[in-house]
Image (tube, rainbow, N blue to C red):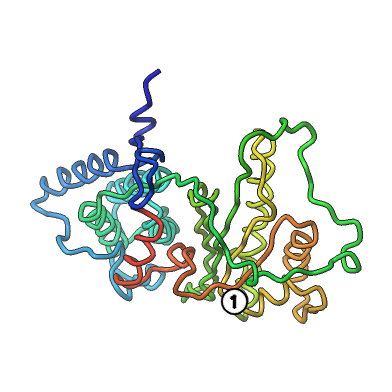
Amino acid sequence: WEAPVKYLGVNIGRYSIPGDARKDHHWFMSSDGYVKAAVRAVEDKLAKCDKVLYSKARSPMSSGYRPELDVSAELNADQTQYYQELIGVLHWAIELGRVDIHVNVALLSQYLANPRAGHMDQVLRIFAYLKKHDRSKLVFDDTPVAWDESCFNPAEWEDFYPGAKENLPPDPLEPRGNPVQTNCFVDANHAGDQVTRRSHTGILLYLNTALVSWFSKRQNTVESASFGSEFIALKIAVEQIHALRCKLRMMGIPLDGETNVFCDNQAVVINSSFPESQLKKKHLSICYHIVRQACATKAIQIAKTHTDYNLSDLLTKSLNADKHFTLRRMILR
């Protein structure tokens, strides 16, 4: 049996984590080959027009750029088609692990039907960024995280959600092997869109220390406060957590207790973790009860994390180069 080295454009291999005595114990996947080929194709296209990629792209998007405020000239039909092709290429790079460009591509994807010259410039800047930062591995580290359990609030939910139980798959395989820890980071950029004032959700799901799922998308509603946008993001995260826990059980993978969920809004953590907390915004009642019932069934437990350490912040808005680099290094190697 030979270990795979490439699958659907992704490079696969063994990885040694510094300080870990288990040499070449971990697997990694990398989009290096796909990204380099994509960058070369863009450069070849630009060369025909006597143009080159920007040479100093420290971040995927220009500082302070807002795609919704762009009023530059509209692209013609051929340019629009090429814009759509480039967005498609970038979406597959994200599927192959380039989490660091996810939110930027999501923001620019909103203008596929009628892109402008400024939007195209930012897409090309993303390719310039990928050329400068072409090596990024997702390492599937099986080491569980030793969380401080005092961060979580143990509570009795029986009086609030009597008989609440987690939905289990009907015919799961018999659990075998070591239990797997599930962890989640969730965040929302409140009213980030300056035209519609919709917020943007970012979610990262981990098995032990291995990132397995990432999500970045604009919310469908407008919220008057960050509390609402964070609760909606948390509700979406809970739905993804339920799906992940169900899949793992169907594959016979034992779970190590609740999924540990981290967000940086103290009010949301209190309303989710303390049964006696009451909701004052009725329009959020569905999100409120979905999240709290997940706590009651012991599917999740929620803790507050500092904004600087909330990894999902990378998926909610375009960050300055320094913070983008810091969070990127916490996720990719």
Q: Residue furthest top?
A: 1
Q: Quadrant of residue 33?
A: top left
> How dense is the environment of label 1, judged by Cα within 10 Å: few (below 14), some, or many (20 and up)?
some
Task: Identify which residue is drawn at 62% across, 60% down.
Answer: 260
Relative placement, left or right, of 234 versus 59 is: right
Toward the viewer: 89 or 173? 173
Residue 236, percent from left and from top: 64, 58
Q: Amino acid at mark 1?
A: Asn
Q: Quadrant of the N terminus?
A: top left
Relative placement, left or right, of 307 versus 67 is: right
Residue 51, percent from left and from top: 11, 54
Task: Identify which residue is drawn at 70% across, 77% down.
Answer: 270
Relative placement, left or right, of 289 versus 130 is: right
Residue 4, percent from left and from top: 37, 27
Q: Quadrant of residue 111?
A: bottom left
User: Looking at the image, is 145 positioned above or below residue 12?
Assistant: below
Q: Residue furthest left?
A: 50
Question: Which residue in the structure is indicated by mark 1?
Answer: 265
Residue 300, percent from left and from top: 69, 59
Q: Secondary structure at mark 1?
A: loop
Toward the viewer: 40 or 255? 255
Q: Quadrant of residue 330?
A: bottom left
